[in-house]
Image (cartoon, coloured by chain):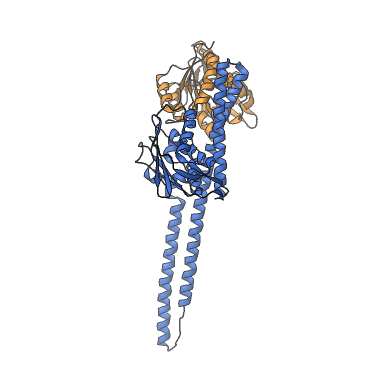
Chain colours: A blue, B orange
Amino acid sequence: MLRKIFHPALIFILLQVAWFGFLSLWIVWFIQNELKIEALGRQVGLKDVGGGWFILVGGSFLMLMILLGITFLFVYQTREARFNRLQRDFISSITHELKSPLASIQLYLETISLRDPPPDDRREFIDLMLKDTERLSGLIDNMLVASRIRYGKVILDLRPVDIYQFIQDFMVQAAEQYGWEPGAVTFNERKGLTVMVDEKYMEIVLNNIVHNAVKYSNKEFRLRVDLAASGRSVKVGFTDQGMGIQRKELKKLFKVFYRSPLTRSSEVRGSGLGLFIVSNVTRALGGKVTASSEGLGRGATFTLTLPRAAVQGKQTA
Amino acid sequence: MNRFHRILLVEDEANLARGLTYNLEAEGYRILLAQDGRVAMEAVEAGGFDLVVLDIVLPHVDGYKILRRIRELYPRLPVLILTAKLEEGDRILGLELGADDYVTKPFHLKELLLRIRGMVRRMTWYDGRSPAEEYRFGPNRVNFKSLKAQGVAGERTLTVKEATLLEVLIEHEGQVLSREQLLTEVWGYPPDLVTRTVDAFIARLRSYFEADPKKPIYILSQRGLGYRFVRPPAEVSPESD
């Protein structure tokens, strides 16, 4: 309760109101005095008495500038503090994310060393370790891409790609990785839609979208992919049946390190990098991503809009 | 020895859960695996375990809530927290809520199995003790079989680690025991992050048995050296009924 009362933003607003009130009083006092001096001057027959209007305008301007400067500093500091808090949360989450597959690999290596398991078990353990290394590699890729985005060093190798074929190939691999049953992913067949993308980055985008759909899936995992041509673009929609998104969260989702309070309270693991990467890589590809949801518990749709323009070659974003 | 001991393993990482189950079953334990907080809570309500290995970051219900519920229902049940959460605050919170040990991921398999074996053995050892063994100091009474304690703060059941720590201190009455000695005697051997674990348990014992835990008269700190158990000279020698 006390924290709410003494919240820095509230104190700042109160100080600004007091400061503005003081400025207004000073202006009123100054005008009244100026009028009195002018009246007195007229009574004694003096001309050009007073003349402090320049001081009034100059003083008010100066005070307003100070007020604006303080406001700017406060907003800047608040943003910095928020970013630092997000970064701290990120380091904590990413450490956790990295440690889990690492712990699993160490456990299986020590198990093999300690127990000398039969060949079937040994093979199973090696497969599990390979999955863990893939997960580690994905996490590290995400961190590297996020860092490249922040420092504007994403170098794209754009090539024409049949997006239907590309997504289908990706889903075959994903089905194996996540162990989906047949029919878990459905999509409308739209062949011949060619987009200009960097395959490596496009795979990272798809990885993040699919990984989120799996992670936030409440019940049985289901994903629908909709492909459609739209003028000089191609729209690719991914609709899941997961926990859904609150309307107020829709725009914040794409900010770096951002994790919605709901995902944090439900203890779903994550780093807050995935959708930041999706949004920025898609933008670098000349497209955009939007999110929509009918509300909590009603799934979500992420729509990628990708350019069909036939520009080839290397580009720096 | 372990054949009939049941362990509730609460771990949401499927790969890790598989490896842990494999190893614990190879040691002769019977394992019930709970891969999210809700399932774990249901298992805790159903009961019938000799030990719980508990992750903290879990879907639906976090490990701290599960630990609280375990302590409400089974004050003696040994609980080992196995988590990737590294911060000292998390460790202290886990121990304050009544966990007996705290292992961080990644971990060494042999070390984990040793700790689990030690916790189960100690539990079995207390079960096998004479029901009449009761120790008194001041207004406090502790039964080291039932682990029931009557302290200044009322009646409660000690966890196995709390009872072991108190017993080790009493056995060495008047003698200063370093934190490292206590870790070796009570937890089996020094854990990776040492001192605060003992401190957290000492704070728990003081809150049960000291009229003013900030000015203890039984469990004293020896700055820079460790802890010792004393009884004021006015008290009679220990009674065993």
Estimate the x, y position of residue B64 in percent, counting from the top left: 46, 30
Residue occupying the point 57% across, 26% down: A129
Estimate the x, y position of residue B169 in percent, counting from the top left: 59, 22
Apparent side of residue A294 relative to residue A127 in the rendered image (left or right): left
Residue occupying the point 42% across, 21% down: B43
Estimate the x, y position of residue B123 in percent, counting from the top left: 52, 16
Apparent side of residue A34 relative to residue B116 in the rendered image (left or right): left
Apparent side of residue A126 relative to residue B146 in the rendered image (left or right): right
Q: Residue furthest right?
A: B225
Q: Residue furthest front?
A: A192
Q: Nearer the viewer, residue B95 or A139?
A: A139
Q: Residue furthest bottom?
A: A45
Label tally: 0
Residue A195 visible from this viewpoint: yes
Q: Nearer the viewer, residue A164 or A64?
A: A164
Residue occupying the point 46% across, 74% down: A56
Does B68 sit above or below residue A94? above
Does A158 sit above or below residue B94? below
Residue B202 visible from this viewpoint: no
Q: Nearer the viewer, residue A227 or A126?
A: A227
**Could you tell me which quadrant the N terminus of chain A lies in?**
top left
Q: Nearer the viewer, residue B218 or A102?
A: A102
Estimate the x, y position of residue B198 in percent, counting from the top left: 58, 27
